Image (tube, rainbow, N blue to C red):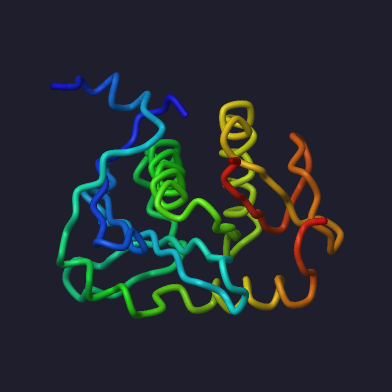
Amino acid sequence: MNLNKYPLKAEQTLMVFEFISEGPKGNVAKIVQYSETNLKGFYNLGFGDKNEKTGEIIDDVITNNNDSQIVLATVASTVYAFTDKYPDTWIFATGLTKSRTRLYRMGITNNLIEIQKNFHVYGLRDNKWQKFKKDMEYEAFLVKRKK
Amino acid sequence: MMDIKKLNKKKLPIVKIDKSLEKFKDKILFKDKLENANQVLKTIGLPK
């Protein structure tokens, strides 16, 4: 994805990333966490804001920092970093709200050709996983690095 | 030194290791989403 991205920090295992969103609302620390689900090798991608004063993590908040494309591209770049370290994992992602899930879908759609060079991408629709197609609504996404 | 344009074209990002993030490693920060993922994977299963 040839989009601008924010610089990333992470702890050693690359399960937790942090970057700083910059915009009219100021600098906002964002956290991305990969947590293993009950299914071995399947990780949930969690994403939210970190309150710098309290350290509290707020899930899926809408910051309105006018940089959603850069934020999405940065989150996507963590997928590259994570799957480079853990190439056999699957990543599950969804938004807490329909509008947030739609934003994720648009992010995938706008970069689908590039993403599909490196990843298998599935969308959840009608209680089934389907190969991701443009212009379809999905409830969640699964991606796996191609070998 | 690599310029910003070249850096942004790279798919694999440069990640600076920050030990202060270790404190989050063993915590579940996005519990609702993880529970949702577990529920979906349990009921829907995997892609065929």
Who's the residue at 76% across and 56% down the image?
Answer: A124
Who's the residue at 39% across and 37% down the image?
Answer: A70
In this rendering, the answer to whether A19 lies above or below A109 is below
Spot occupied by residue B26 in the image (x, y as percentages of width and height): 33, 79
Question: As rendered, which of B32 and A119 lies closer to the eye?
Answer: A119
* Residue A41 shown left or right of residue A120 in the figure: left
Spot occupied by residue B37 in the image (x, y as percentages of width and height): 62, 71
In this rendering, the answer to whether A137 lies above or below B27 is above
Question: As rendered, which of A74 and B26 lies closer to the eye?
Answer: B26
Q: Residue extending furthest right?
A: A126
| Quadrant hosting residue A2 | top left
* Residue A110 shown left or right of residue A60 in the figure: right
| Quadrant hosting residue A68 | top left
Who's the residue at 33% across and 71% down the image?
Answer: A57
Spot occupied by residue A138 in the image (x, y as percentages of width and height): 74, 52
Spot occupied by residue A56 in the image (x, y as percentages of width and height): 28, 75
In this rendering, the answer to whether A43 lies above or below A131 is below
- Count of picture labels: 0
In this rendering, the answer to whether B12 lies above or below A34 is above
| Quadrant hosting residue A31 | bottom left
Who's the residue at 41% across and 32% down the image?
Answer: B11
Question: As rendered, which of A112 and B17 lies closer to the eye?
Answer: B17
Q: Which quadrant of the figure contains the C terminus of chain A?
A: top right
